[in-house]
Image: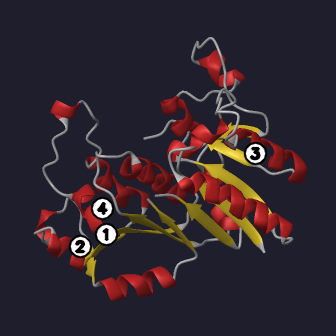
Amino acid sequence: MADDTMEEGSNGGGVIKKFMFVNRKAPYGTVYALESLEVVLIAAAFEQDVSLAFIDDGVYEIVKGQDTKSTEMKNFSPAYRALEGYDIEKLYVEKESMETRGLTEKDFVVPVQILSAKEMADLMESQDVVLSF
Amino acid sequence: MKLAVLVNEGPYTHQASDTAYQFTKAALEKGHEIFRVFFYNDGVNNGTRLMVPPSDDRNIQKRWTELAEKHKLDLVVCIAAAQRRGLLDDSEAKRHGKDASNIAPGFRISGLGQLVEAGIQADRLVVFGD
């Protein structure tokens, strides 16, 4: 995505930390979703243990059938499907956020694990670095 | 403790930018090390030398620049986020054929790898955002 993706090589001398990216915003109303995804890809390039959490309106980021033509914005939802190629396979959706919005697991462009708010909190607790967007 | 700070919001619009500064200053005064302050999203706008706030208000850019000078802070602005928003240093301005650069003293432009590295190297990465 970003043209500066691979410019720095240091991964801190082989240290691998658990990075969680918490995505809380709808995909196009603000730039947070897109710019979060850009950091995710860099963290993967640094060979970190990356996971993504989708909560609140963040669950809309991975909903199928996004069409941005009329807004002249770039539809970046296909990029979530490419995450597997970066060995990013830990994608979590908060159950309460999903259900409140009338969504089910079948509505997402990628396979995800559904967690309760409590389970999500425990997972966050186990991380080294939590970046919230 | 070795801390890293992420600033995700722009100056004057959002308190996150003020709080990040106050936190960084307080941490330094308490004797903590600040490994790096990284500016992302609209946070990159904290680093423009062209801001001219009213004289009875704080100057957010100057505050960062002075803190950086005093404590040899590493203030890094994300290149991709900066380019979108029109924040350039001399070499980026030249590279993109622009007639001016606007990055403030004490700030430097670099890649997102610097943020990930800060997350790896610091004991805590503290995020200031919306």
The reply to whether residue A125 is visible in this rendering is yes
Tell me which chain the residue with mark 4 is part of.
Answer: A
Instruction: Please name the amino acid that badge 2 sits on.
Output: Ser
- Badge 4 is on which residue? A58
Instruction: Please name the amino acid that badge 3 sits on.
Output: Arg
* Mark nearer the N terminus (1 vs 2): 1
Tell me how far mark 2 sits from mark 4, CA to CA. Answer: 9 Å
Q: Residue at x 29, y 67 (%)?
A: A56
Tell me which chain the residue with mark 2 is part of.
Answer: A
- Badge 2 is on which residue? A97
Placement of B29 over or under B58, stated as above or below: below
Instruction: Please name the amino acid that badge 4 sits on.
Output: Gly
In which image quadrant can residue B57 be found? top right
Q: Residues within 10 Å of mark 2 (few under 14, many from 20)?
A: many
Marks 1 and 3: which is nearer the front?
A: 3
Q: Position of residue A32 (x, y in %)?
A: 40, 51
Q: Residues within 10 Å of mark 4 (few under 14, many from 20)?
A: many
* Callouts 4 and 1 on one subunit: yes
Tell me how far mark 3 sits from mark 2, CA to CA. Answer: 39 Å
**Mark 4 and 1 residues: CB-CB less than 8 Å, in contact?**
yes
SS state under label 3: helix
- Badge 1 is on which residue? A55
Foreground: B79 or B62?
B62
**Mark 2 and 4 residues: CB-CB less than 8 Å, in contact?**
yes
- Badge 3 is on which residue? B63
Tell me which chain the residue with mark 1 is part of.
Answer: A
Instruction: Please name the amino acid that badge 1 sits on.
Output: Ile
Q: Residue at x 64, y 33 (%)?
A: B53
